Amino acid sequence: MAESNTPNDPYQNIRPYHDREVNLVLNKLIRNDEFISAITRYQFPKLASWLGFVLKPAIRIFLAQKTDEIKTIADFQGLVAGYMEK
């Protein structure tokens, strides 16, 4: 399948990521407050409203450390799958 990186590609914003993009995308997510808030509320539903100011920076640091280990989309999916199994 040919990659398309042209500005006129109507699917550019919704296409799947490639392994070479994983690091950049994960770093953007770690800096995204909405993403961090969602993880905080999912993992700590009862504490998020009271201790979010403590939990969010801790989650951000934890994820930053974990992203150093992630090199592929499959690596990321494996990490997320482990946390979704409550």
Image (cartoon, helix red, strand yellow):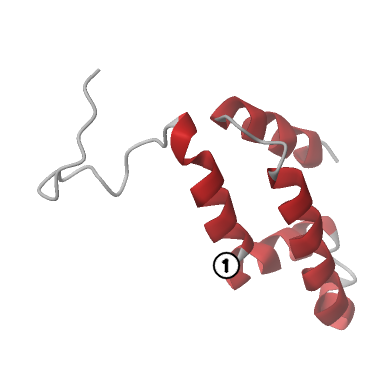
For the residue carrying disc 1, how many other residues have a C-alpha within 10 Å: few (<14), some (14-19), or many (20+)?
few
* Residue closer to the observer: 48 or 62: 62
Q: Position of residue 31 (x, y in %)?
A: 60, 67
The quadrant holding residue 33 is bottom right
The quarter of the rendered structure image containing the C terminus is: top right
Q: Is residue 68 above or below residue 51?
A: above
Which residue lies most toward the top here? 1
Q: Position of residue 36 (x, y in %)?
A: 68, 65
Residue sitting at 21 percent across and 40 percent down?
Answer: 5
Q: Is residue 63 above or below residue 75?
A: below
Q: Position of residue 47 (x, y in %)?
A: 90, 72
Residue sitting at 42 percent across and 37 percent down?
Answer: 17
Residue under label 1: 32
Q: Position of residue 11 (x, y in %)?
A: 22, 42
The quarter of the rendered structure image containing the N terminus is: top left
SS of the residue under disc 1: loop
Residue flagged by tag 1: what amino acid is it? Answer: Asn
Left of 41 or right of it: where is 26?
A: left
The quadrant holding residue 49 is bottom right
Which residue lies most toward the left here? 8
Report the label total. Answer: 1
